Amino acid sequence: MPRVKRGVTTHAKHKSVLALTKGHRASKHKLIKRAKESMIKSLSYAYAHRRERKGDMRRLWISRVNAASRLQGMTYGEFINGLKKSGVVVNRKLMADMAVKEPEAFVQLVTIAKKSV
């Protein structure tokens, strides 16, 4: 059986690992073994935090809607309850965007919610 030299593929793999760990501290971006550990950890964090970001955004939208509804004299809970009772279906992302960019339209939503509460 002929001898197989694997230096080229190994070097390419090592380069890709070191490229992914560029910017990490100490030996985590220089030594292959440490860099591979650091890369696996960082990629798992990236995966988890992509999912976590969705909850972060929802919390941001809720706080924006809460602030805007309080300016109109309603709490967030009362506002959402009023919208549900009146049959208005608007997601929180859209309401937060309306509160920031179109305050007049948001005020109309608040008046609809106030009527049904």
Image (cartoon, grey):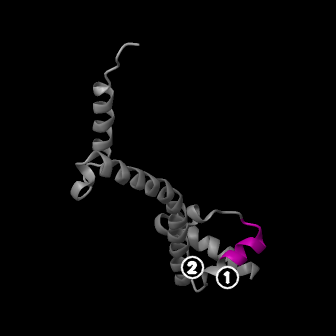
* 109 left or right, relative to 1: right
Residue 76, image quadrant: bottom right
Q: Is residue 52 above or below residue 12?
A: below
Query: Which structural element holds mark 1?
Result: helix
Q: Is residue 84 magenta?
A: yes
Camera-nearest residue between 11 and 75: 11
Q: Is residue 78 magenta?
A: no
Residue type at mark 1: give it: Glu
Residue 81: x and y in percent read 71, 77
> Given the current orientation, which residue lies at the most extreme top position?
1
Please determine whether, in this image, residue 107 is positioned above or below residue 22. below
Residue that protrudes farthest toward the front in the picture: 1
Mark 2 residue element: helix
The secondary structure that dominates the magenta segment is helix
Residue on which disc 2 sits: 69
Identify the residue at horizontal 57%, vertical 70% (top origin).
Answer: 106
**In the image, residue 93 lies at what x, y percent?**
56, 62
Q: How far is the residue under mark 1 from the one under mark 2?
A: 9 Å
Quadrant occupied by the C terminus: bottom right
Q: Please give the range of residues in magenta.
A: 80-88
Badge 2 amino acid? Ser
Who comes first in sequence, dot 1 or dot 2? 2
Task: Report the side of 62 relative to 21 (left or right).
Answer: right
Q: Position of residue 115 (x, y in %)?
A: 73, 80
User: Relative to 65, does residue 54 appear above or below in the rendering?
Assistant: above
Q: What residue lies at 61% left-to-right and 84% top-to-bottom?
A: 74
Residue that appears at 63% across and 71% down: 109
Q: Are marks 1 and 2 in contact (CB under 8 Å)?
A: yes
The percent position of residue 20, horizontal first and vertical second, equals 32, 45
Mark 1: give few (<14), some (14-19) or many (20+) Cα within 10 Å.
some
Q: Which residue is mark 1?
A: 78
